[in-house]
Image (cartoon, rainbow, N blue to C red):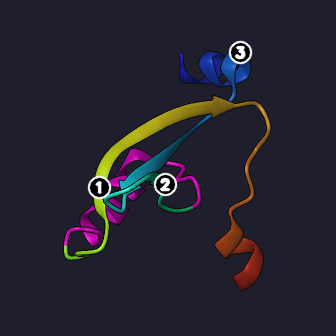
Amino acid sequence: MNKLLKLLFGNKYYLNIINDHQQDYIASTPFKTRKEAKEHRNSLEDNRSVYFVRTVSFRTKEPLITIPNKING
């Protein structure tokens, strides 16, 4: 079933949305799994300048290249 969804709708990614008490922002590059997004969200808990709003998911047929992998590798 997952292979069929991936073929029809593309790869699923997750984004964390944060707010700096004025505006909402995307917190980082897209994550491939919900677990990675949750770990990032947990790392934001001690940050006093921004707060976590929600995690959103989206699908795209084009594979996304994450910026950290491009810089580090």
Instruction: Report, in whole angstroms, how far the alpha carbon at label 3 lies from the one at label 2.
Output: 29 Å
Q: Which mark is residue 44?
A: none
Q: Examine the structure image and report whether residue 41 is included in the region drawn in magenta.
A: yes
Q: Which residue carries the number 1 mark?
A: 52
Name of the residue lying farthest toward the bottom: 72
Instruction: Report, in whole angstroms, how far the alpha carbon at label 1 lies from the one at label 3.
Output: 31 Å
Looking at the picture, does residue 60 appear above or below residue 30? Answer: above
Residue at x-position 69% and y-position 28%:
10
Report helix, strand or loop for mark 1: strand
Residue at x-position 31% and y-position 66%:
50
Q: Closer to the N terminus: mark 1 or mark 2?
A: 2
Q: Which residue carries the number 2 mark?
A: 25
Q: Amino acid at mark 1?
A: Phe
> Looking at the image, can residue 68 be seen?
yes
Query: Magenta region: which residues?
Result: 29-45
**Residue 6: percent from left, percent from top:** 65, 25
Looking at the picture, does residue 67 appear above or below residue 33? Answer: below
> Looking at the image, can residue 73 be seen?
no
Report helix, strand or loop for mark 3: helix
Q: Amino acid at mark 3?
A: Leu
Looking at the picture, does residue 63 appear above or below residue 68? Answer: above
Q: Closer to the N terminus: mark 3 or mark 2?
A: 3
Residue at x-position 76% and y-position 44%:
63
Q: On the picture, is 10 further left or further right than 30?
A: right
Instruction: Report, in whole angstroms, how far the alpha carbon at label 1 lies from the one at label 2.
Output: 10 Å
Q: Which residue carries the number 3 mark?
A: 8
